[in-house]
Amino acid sequence: MNRDLLDLLPDERAQLWNFTLQLLENHYQNSEKNRASPSLDFRKIKDNASIYDFSRAIPKTDAVRHVIESLRQYTVHTTHPSYFGLFNPRPVFPGILADVITAVFNPQMAAWSHAPFATEAENHVIREMAAKFGYHRPQADGTFCSGGAEANLTAVLCALNRYFPDYATTGIQSLKSHPVLYCSAEAHHSVVRAARVCGLGLQAVRHIPVDSSQRMIPDRLLAQLKEDLENGYYPFMVIANAGSTGTGAIDPLPEIAAICQHYDLWFHVDGAYGGAIIVDPDQQNLISGIEKSQSITLDIHKWFSAPMGTSLFLTSDSAILSQTFRITADYMPKEAHDMEVNDPFAHSIQWSRRFIGLRFYMILLMLGWDGLRDMVRHITAIGSYLKEKLKENGWHLANETALPIACFHDPDFSTDPLFHSKIHQKIIESGQAWISQYSVNGQPNLRACITNYASSRKEIDDLIVLLQQARNSLKK
């Protein structure tokens, strides 16, 4: 096999690097010039993706141009400053650089001895981030995950192994009592999925009612706990929100922590989104009580603007990850068996995986905690401006949160789901902005969330104009 065919010659690589970087730089610098959302013509998009049958290689620059242009044309541009949708931000450049470096070195993150620097860089970030949340650094542990769903699943598995030591060996069916876990009615659906994946089943999840601000009601949690104990169930875990997906609700963490402590329950906080405010001294009081948890989910690819697929599971129990995932495999490298290290494959759900922690490591190296704090403050300020402008223009805010999420509706059409769906459709079809829809207390709402550090007051003003135009056109 001719290695040059795969590596390419140095001159060819240089040409492709320059060609690719020029196209990517043009997109990154001018992302606001694209439509925020594409025109969804299924047949046209499918034909575009399958235009080549791979029977022969095409010119390399043609291949690069085809992929980049197709992504530019047929993607919801989450990097667009007028993308006000889900938690998909514009990635900061240090995180992008990290992905390039990782792709070239391609470290194998299963065994410590194969990637010692990569593993210890991740461990360092984990300890520092855990300390930010108030965990005792020597006892803190964690692992990088592909997303919040994996982090929440890791939490459930750790809790099961903590309270049911035979679970890893004999499985759910061997347990004499019925384990149940508790979460807010506004909890992310990954909690339900975790219960299904680990064998608990949907009936083991107790959804606790929320108040008018979409916060879990501690008294209802306590009542459900007592009822389950009387009926022979085994409560073992409570999952609280620190910034729910739909409304940005933050559950009353101190009260929930006290209940968990009294009943000896694993307390997990899903701070995938809102947990990021821990870096801002002016806002971190909003999640006071999180330091009393046993574990936390934090998505670095949300508010901290790393490339997608960068999440953290943190725990205050230094032994639980090894207890949950440790397994022996004869074929794995043994060079570090005499060292006090943890092989990542025996420390998390994943086995072979990408060096995703480099994204956050590079961000911290280049921006520091102050840079993240300033980004969080800017996005929060733009969110406050959005809410002010919505109120000024007669929209009613249906959610109460300090986080930059606004769920809103026209009070004259508060019970008309079609009215707001039509507004949503007009915004999306315009290609000038992207928002979503969300029901709050059974009421249809439009939803806008600031996720992009490049969003400014200008984009908010433009969104208000679009909303007013769409609303007025439907009222005629």
Image (spheres, rainbow, N blue to C red):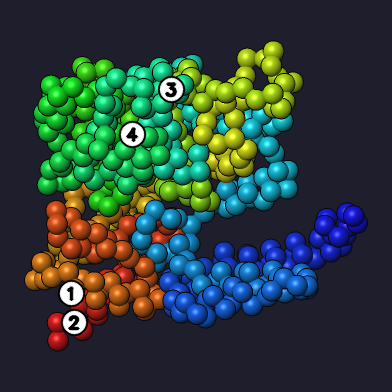
Badge 1 marks a residue whose secondary structure is helix
> Marks 2 and 1, Cα distance to the nearest angstrom?
8 Å
Q: In the depicted view, which residue is nearer to us: 243 or 327?
A: 327
Instruction: Give the farthest residue toward the front.
Output: 173
Within 10 Å of disc 4 (Cα), the crowding (few <14, some 14-19, many 20+) is many
Q: Are marks 3 and 4 in contact (CB under 8 Å)?
A: no
Q: Do the residues labelled 2 and 1 touch (CB within 8 Å)?
A: yes
The tag earlier along the polypeptide, 3 or 4, is 3
Q: Please, what is the three-letter code of the amino acid marked with disc 1?
A: Phe
Which residue is depicted at the point 73% across and 43% down?
105
The tag earlier along the polypeptide, 2 or 1, is 1
* Residue corresponding to mark 4: 200
Badge 2 marks a residue whose secondary structure is helix
Q: In which quarter of the image is residue 338?
A: top right
Within 10 Å of disc 1 (Cα), the crowding (few <14, some 14-19, many 20+) is some
Q: Residue 293, can we see it?
A: no
How far across and how far down the image is residue 281, in percent?
Answer: 35, 35
Query: Is 401 positioned to the left or the right of 431 in the image?
Result: left
Between marks 3 and 4 in the image, the one whose residue lies nearer the viewer: 3
* Residue corresponding to mark 3: 170
Q: Please, what is the three-letter code of the amino acid marked with disc 2?
A: Leu
- The numbered disc on residue 474 is 2
